[in-house]
Image: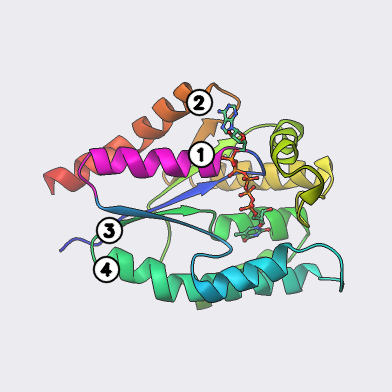
Amino acid sequence: MNRGRFITLEGIEGAGKTTAATFVLRWLREQGVAALATREPGGTPLAERIRQIALERGGEAVSPVTETLLMFAARALHVQNVILPALARGEWVICDRFTDATRAYQGSGRGVDPRLLDTLATAVHPELEPDCTLLFDLPAAAGLARARGRSGSNADRFEAETVSFFEKARAGYLALAKAEPNRFRVVDALAPLAEVERAVSAALSGLVHKETVA
Ligand code: T5A
């Protein structure tokens, strides 16, 4: 049996990743591809508990390195208990954020040393990289307006950050996409939903086709 494909969805707050994950799952199933959707931080019962700790506001100070370690602790559980078993069963995994989020938020946003991020990525998922990463790109102010419109006064620790923090994360994402043009597809997240969906299915149809002729 062929290993499944690992598709990651990335972008700053309010970029439309969660909306796109639902669409991708439905679209892949229509193409006859077995797939599951999951998210980071989270995706397993223990990793979801780490997510709560990482996102909650107030209380103790959380340094950028601590934040990074929380993300990778959750990721280690998720990779071992959900992602690798699903790929081994031949299913596609649609993951709302993965290590590129740590590079963009903790690396570009918070200034964590990229060498630490490389070391942790190698330790946590030595042989796993996404087959395709869809980067939903939009200006930080537009993404935050969408995210805050939904969360209101319940904004989490990240949503409470400044626009300039998210612009740094956005620039980090765009630099990653530029460095790996074969893996990344940049989608204009300001476009109407129908256009976003067309761009997403066009980006994935090559991979689906390879699968069905293999
Ligand atoms: N984090 C995570 C790190 O710092 N490091 C890491 O390593 C990891 C893995 C996760 C937080 O953790 C941080 C980053 C995050 O801050 P989260 O709740 O998962 O928290 O945060 P987000 O992923 O940003 O979730 P959001 O829900 O805010 O954004 P989405 O999923 O990108 O956006 P979505 O789909 O919920 O859409 C937002 C709104 O916009 C509308 C939707 O209907 C919705 O109302 N929308 C559109 N409107 C118009 N046109 C379109 N094309 C639209 N697409 C969506």
Q: Residue 175's mark?
A: none
Give the CA separation, mark 1 to mark 2.
9 Å
- Residue plotted at (59% across, 63% down): 41
Residue interval drawn in magenta: 15-33
- Residue plotted at (53% across, 70% down): 75
Amino acid carrying mark 4 in the image? Ala
Amino acid carrying mark 1 in the image? Thr
Give the CA separation, mark 4 to mark 3.
7 Å
Amino acid carrying mark 2 in the image? Leu
Number of other residues with Cα within 10 Å of mark 1, as a class: few under 14, some 14 to 19, many 20 or more: few
Give the mark, 3 or 2, whose residue is nearer the N terminus.
Answer: 3
Q: Where residue 125 sits in the image (x, y, percent)?
A: 46, 72
- Give SS at disc 1: helix
Q: Which residue is disc 1 drawn over?
A: 19
Image marks 1 and 2: residues in contact by CB distance under 8 Å: yes
Q: Which residue is disc 2 drawn over?
A: 193
Q: Which residue is disc 4 drawn over?
A: 88
